[in-house]
Image (cartoon, rainbow, N blue to C red):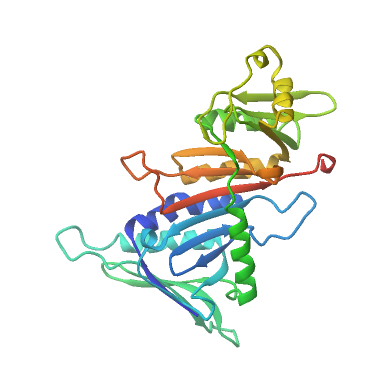
Amino acid sequence: MKFKASFTDDGISLLDKRFLPALDKVGRVCHVYLTPTHAMLLHNLLGSAGPDGDGPQCVAQFAKDLLFRDYSVSSRDANRVAFSVDVALLQRALRSALAVHAQWPAAGDAPAPAIQVKLVNKQTAGSRSAAPFLTFETKGARSAVVQDVPISKPLSRSDVARLQEALDAAQELPETLVQVPDLPQLQNLVDRLKNIGDLLTVNVTQYGDLHLQVSTSLVTVGSEFKRLRILGVRANAPVGDQNVSATTRMEMAVERGEALSVQVSMKHLVKSLQCHLAKPDCTFYGIAPNGACLTVIFQYFIPGTRVTDKSISFYCRLPVLDPGTN
């Protein structure tokens, strides 16, 4: 299997300043998945079960032309290649490459050569066999630097198939999505709630309401965001519901089939909020059919417009916990 490409300026900036810092906060290791049309960073899609669920899944998918030019990937498995890598090491290599790249002479001279990346097998000093690396080649004004980032052995055909199946399953959208416009307010709310309990109840209604609540044997604390922008299935809120408490209103909406309610780990939600380091233009919350998971979708616009940039897809899925887990 082979992979070789040159970074675009926009592509390497996106990874270095936005997506890798976000994914590094979610988890130390991610899968890099390369296909003939897309490059992806996937966190926890092949995670093993644990006492608090698999943890949040994160998917960052890019059209190959956004990140690379002269892109070439080949394998016996439909030209698909996947491997795992330490996110911090990957980001360190990118930043070092950018620092060398910045040494190129100022405008007026020939443009700096693009930063190249390729998949190689090398035998390092002290080892008896070759090991796989993601290699970055960079040229500066007076130097050329080659950096090797250790990676896992590329996934087998069966594991790539499992990864693709997990990716396909993760792309199912909730019927109703609500946009959270005030992310600092949501972050402040979650920072307060996480000091109260470890289990969070999340409700999403077809009226455009998002309700978060933590309950313990001593106290119940929550907050709601109302009349949010809705994508997908929507309904008109009954007028009489405004005269009851938020908790009762949510329970009535669930009974009418106009809302879904799930419980998730507070630490999972806190991790998902770190994805805002990728600086999305919009963030939507929704609950998958039958309460399968809580889905957080990050939307990007083409710069200078309000048109969705279809070359970027970024979202998280938080596993639903049994009430008895806590």
Asked whether residue 156 appears in the rendered view, the answer is no
Left/right placement of residue 139 relative to residue 192 reads left
Which is nearer the eye, 11 or 181? 181
Q: Quadrant of the C terminus?
A: top right
- Residue at the location (51% across, 82% down)? 122
Left/right placement of residue 37 relative to residue 263 reads left
Please count the marks in the image.
0
Q: Which image quarter: residue 150?
A: bottom right
Which is nearer the eye, 33 or 247? 247
Residue 105 position (above or below residue 287):
below
Position in image of residue 221 (x %, y %): 72, 24
- Residue at the location (52% across, 62% down)? 89
Position in image of residue 64 (x %, y %): 40, 63
Asked whether residue 138 appears in the rendered view, the answer is yes
Which is nearer the eye, 13 or 241? 241
Q: Which image quarter: residue 158?
A: bottom right
- Residue at the location (57% across, 53% down)? 171
In the current view of this chain or complex, which residue is farthest to the left? 108
Position in image of residue 49 (x %, y %): 76, 57
- Residue at the location (77% across, 24% down)? 220
Position in image of residue 293 (x %, y %): 68, 45
